[in-house]
Amino acid sequence: MTAQSNSKKRRFFARREYLGLLDRRHVYILPTQAGWGFALVLLVMLLGSMNYNNSMGYALSFLLGSMAMVSTLHTHRTLLGLRIEAGKVAPVFAGESAPFQLWIDNRGNVARHALVLQRDNSKFFIDIPADQRVSIDIPVPTEQRGRVFLGRVMVYSRFPVGLFRAWSYIDLDVSTLVYPQPLGHRNLPLGEQTQNTGEGSPRDGGGEDFIGYRDYKLGDSPRHIDWKAVARGQNWMIKQFGGLRAAQVWLTWDDVSMLNNLEAALSQLCLWILVAESQGAQYGLKIPGCSLAPNTGEQHRELCLQALALHAII
Amino acid sequence: MATTQTHSPYLFPRLDTLLWLMATLILVVLPHLSRLSVWIPALFFALLLWRYQITRKQWHLPPHWLLLSMTLLVVVGLFFSYGLRFGRDANVALLVVLCGLKLLEMNSQREALLVCFLSYFLIITNFLYSQSIPTALYMGIVMVVATATLISLSDEKNSLSTRQRLRLSSTLLMQALPVMLVLFFLFPRVAGPFWKLPLDSHSGITGLSDSMSIGDVSQLSLSDEVAFRVKFDGDIPPPEQRYWRGPVLWWTNGRDWKSGFQQYQLVDQLNIHPTGQAFDYAVTLEPHNERWLFALELPIQAPTEASMTADYRILASQPVRERMRYQLRSYSHYRADLITNVQERLALRLPKGKHPGARALAAQWRQESPHPEAVVERALRYFNEEPFVYTYTPELLLDDPIDEFLFETRQGFCEHYAAAFTVLMRAAGIPARVVTGYLGGNVNPIGNYLIVRQRDAHAWSEVWLPNKGWVRIDPTNAVAPTRVEQGIESALPTAFNPLDLSRDSPLVIIWQQLDNGWDALNNGWNQWILGYGPARQRELLSRLGMPGIDWGGMTIALVIIIACLLLGYAVWMFLGPQLAVRDPAQQIYLRFCKKLARLGLHRHPSEGPLDFASRVSAARPDLAAPIQNIIELYVQTRYRSQFQTVAQLRKAVLHFRL
């Protein structure tokens, strides 16, 4: 099948909007290649039976033909009444594949076998027992930062005898963010702190950068106790230092302006954010159109990465 | 539960699918085994075993050149086994071996499907040999397995058990059955064949021959095979009148008897004058690969599809290769006067220098009384008074079979008596000929028809008497009258009766009834299923109130009926489950609430499960633990989409006792 006829067919079959339920108007069915072959075999058998006046030959040909006809109902039923909803999907970095979770709800009392979900050219096989709801992850490969959409997923089945294929298209409007790929050779811009080597990797121990907390143990220096936490009535925690200093880091456009490529610049910023976060530093992001005050934590990191992902994307 | 695994690069198909395929192939080939040359099944099973080992031990598939050369070798082998005329048997053999070879090449869904289709083809080849009820039932089972194989091929994740596959396959076929019946009866039938059938299409079909040889080891067929069945419109003639006329033998060399060139001679005027009772009947003749048809003595006219010869034989236009049904009218008494000059000469001819004893005896009788009828009487008296024995294991007759039989051994069966009597008549100057056919037949009370079997084969004589025409004389009647009156069983020694049961013992009667029932079933099968052709179809349609419907009309009726059937299935399959669609967890929860309501603990419509649970637990502390458990499971199932706990919830509610 050529790409052109494929797209034509799609347009023809995609007139009705998908509302989350595979009902009769959204499930299409046609013979498979094997089905056409089977029809040919049947025709030959029927001609042979006519020629030999063989009643049992007639009976067998008709039985097979009837079986094929009845099988269309079974094939159709494999898809009919399924409810497909989008589940969670986490953001990914460019180059990774985004695992879109789909929930397939089979409220009928018949198990659905050999369902195939096809997105582009990758196929995923799944069985859904009667009266159950099952999730399946569809990994969507990403290349560029920005948004990635699940897009159209075809769900089909040739069950039970492979002579017919019932299919339907699911257009779920789900997307996730694709952060820039964390890449770069530059050190974290720490102003006067230039002792970092390599690709901004943390140095073990000895440093003065805050890297996290641990429980208080006898003999710990009182200077490292997190008094603020104690004042709040929390446990006694010891601030651990190492790697980078618990200083404020501003990640700005100027730091990457020497990289002429926008994507390379964003990749560098992305890497720095990850490093800064893992080191426990307070980092702020300042790029055109967006300024995030220094902070730390998961949520802050997501905000920063989101800013990078969507930067200058129309 | 949900995995996203695609196919790993293993050899297609999986072992279980391969076993299904092999089971189908073996079941299909099994009935062919006895019909194939020995080396073919051997090769077939070897190929199957090889493929099995390939999949199990993950060997490589054999290279293409090897398969190709094997195929060529097989074709050469087939020519050696079956000769250059590549007929039905050779084609079946080729198909069987090709299936085996295809298995060794199979590495994709497509090829596996092809093998499946080939196995369907092999099923149909079995029907070229036998279409009996047992064969049909066996093939039904094979169909279930073959379809289960298709299911196994489509079951990508191998999640169905063997039982589920068989059940689904049976469901499919059972649902297909009504559609198939509609197609079978309403699909416009045409009369074949369209092209020439292979030469050996009908080999192995036997029946009465149109020659006999006196003195050879028993020519008498003791086969129980059905020759034909007869359905009478009115009365069934009494046993002694059930003479079924077949080939007429004119020519003899003293030992062999043959039809001679008279056999195809047709005349305009048959000169038959019926006098006795008329019988109307339909004969369903089993194929015997010859042109003649059997008729009760004596029909006045040939059925439409056949013609009548000058010696009152009915000839079909083609050898009878399929079961044939024809309608006839016969008269129990008649005067048949036709005798041409050629016929008279032939009917008096005896081989020169043979049978001196018989000639002398005939001359003596002729001298005693010149009247032909008296000579006939004398001859019958001779058979009756001399110590003749009716036996189906007579002694061999060597030099002059007729004289040896008449004067020395005096043992024989109908052929001996008919031949000897005819020779005596010819020697006495009375035109005579041998008529072969069947005598008797058993009435099947269940279907109220007559079954005539091969063992009822018989031979008798006809003599031409002035003013009377051709008169049937059965010399066997003079020796063993019970043969004529009670059928062949009474005349034969009871060799097939190991338990020494009398004919009236209850076991024999039950057996007889079962036998009759089975034959009636077979007769119905033959008439309505196997014999269903254009004529039967017209008959059925006019019975259904659609006389004279043409094929366009039939097609429309067919499409409408099938569409209704499928629609019915669709409603049953789609609407049924959809009405039942509800959240299973909620359903179970409602059941649980009903149980509690019986205790007087009614749930407020706006009350959530957790509030309800705490209220009920407070009211009935004794039930608190199970209630909390159920509610917890419900909340998990319903609100956290943990379908795994549905079963647990169901069980908990089921076991919840008040």
Image (spheres, coloured by chain):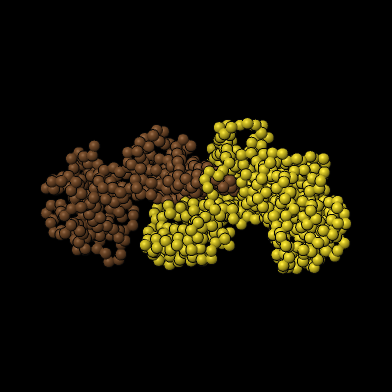
Locate the C terminus of chain A and report the quarter of the image it occupies.
Answer: top left
Q: Residue at x 52, y 55 (%)?
A: B87
- In the displayed structure, B408 sits above or below B440; it is below
Locate the N terminus of chain A and report the quarter of the image it occupies.
Answer: top left
Q: Residue at x 35, y 38 (%)?
A: A5
Query: Left of B590 or right of it: where is B500?
Result: right
Closer to us: B558 or A202: B558
Judge whether residue A103 can be spotted in this image.
no
Q: Residue at x 77, y 59 (%)?
A: B420
Judge whether residue A266 can be spotted in this image.
yes
- In the displayed structure, B529 sits above or below B479; it is above
Name which quarter of the figure residue B277 lies in: top right
| Residue B321 percent across, percent down from the top left | 61, 49
Closer to us: A170 or B148: B148
- In the displayed structure, A245 sits above or below A53; it is below
Shown colour of chain B: yellow
Q: How many marks?
A: 0
Q: Residue at x 60, y 38 (%)?
A: B186
Chain letter for brown, please.
Answer: A
| Residue B539 percent across, percent down from the top left | 66, 37
| Residue B446 percent across, percent down from the top left | 77, 48
Query: Left of B644 or right of it: where is B232?
Result: right
Closer to us: B470 or B610: B470
- In the displayed structure, B41 sits above or below B169; it is below
| Residue A2 percent across, percent down from the top left | 33, 41
Name which quarter of the figure residue B35 lies in: bottom right
Closer to us: B572 or B641: B572
